[in-house]
Image: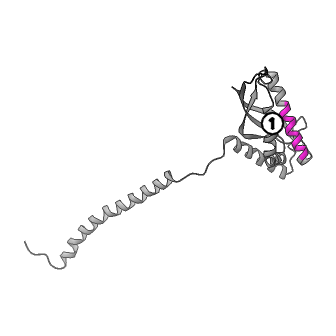
Amino acid sequence: MAAATPAEAPAAAAPKKSALLIPIIAAALLSAALSGAAVFFLAPKPAAAPAHEQAAEAAAEAHGEAAAEGHDAGDKDGKKGTANYLPLTPAFVVNVHDGNDGDASHFLQVEIELSARSAAVVDALKLHNAQIRNALLMLLGAQSSADVASREGKEALQKKVLEEVQRILIQETGKPGVDAVYFTSFVMQ
């Protein structure tokens, strides 16, 4: 065999360099892909609002768009706008005394949502949330277990809660604005 000429030597070395370059590039791409995947899966995600809050916000936006376009959003019964539901979170938890003049007490946990037809009323409810929660805690804590054991007792309490919220809204804004009170959870132990 004849010795390689100087012109053939670089050509023979070129395939060896490109063969080494391919695994290095592949390793770099794989490393970048794994780093990106790690960041995507391990990075903290922003907390999403609960579904009922998203629905309330969407309804408020839709109501606001209809009002901005000059549409009458009135219902057949004369009420304006669609119902906006505002949950009073967290749930109310109070001690209620036993209705038999005993020293026994029970826990009452109630989740409450308020319904209003105006986004302005919802904003007022959010603004005066602390005052409303305080008044409702006092009202719920003044109940006896016998008062709220029956359906009639729960409905009477629901009416009292509505009156209390309306009283605060009238005091703070001059208008009542809340259409209804809903107990979405009611547990007594």
Residue 163 located within the stretch drawn in magenta: yes
Inspect this view and state whether residue 106 appears: yes
Q: Quadrant of the C terminus?
A: top right
From this view, report whether residue 27 is shown above or below residue 153. Answer: below
From this view, report whether residue 99 is shown above or below residue 25. Answer: above
Q: What kind of colouring is applied to the model shown?
A: one colour
Q: Nearer the viewer, residue 75 or 104?
A: 104
Measuring from the top left, give residue 138's x and y in whole percent.
80, 36
Inspect this view and state whether residue 186 appears: no
Measuring from the top left, give residue 133's x and y in whole percent.
78, 41
Quarter-wise, where is residue 55 in the image? top right
Residue 170 located within the stretch drawn in magenta: yes
Q: Quadrant of the N terminus?
A: bottom left
Quarter-wise, where is residue 162 in the image? top right
In the current view of this chain or complex, which residue is farthest to the bottom? 6
**Residue 140 vs residue 74: left or right?**
left
Q: Nearer the viewer, residue 93 or 172?
A: 93
From this view, report whether residue 45 is shown above or below residue 100. Answer: below
**Residue 23 vs residue 177: left or right?**
left
Q: Nearer the viewer, residue 30 or 69?
A: 30
Measuring from the top left, give residue 148's x and y in whole percent.
78, 24
Q: Residue at x 74, y 46 (%)?
A: 57
Measuring from the top left, give residue 69's x and y in whole percent.
84, 52
**Residue 125 vs residue 58: left or right?**
right
Q: Amino acid at mark 1?
A: Met
Assess disc 1: are there few (<14), some (14-19) or many (≥20) residues with their C-alpha within 10 Å of its C-alpha.
few
Q: Residue at x 74, y 24 (%)?
A: 103
Q: Start and end of the magenta stretch?
A: 159-171
In the current view of this chain or complex, which residue is farthest to the right? 174
Please give the residue where the numbered disc 1 appears in the rendered image.
138
**Residue 186 vs residue 157: left or right?**
left
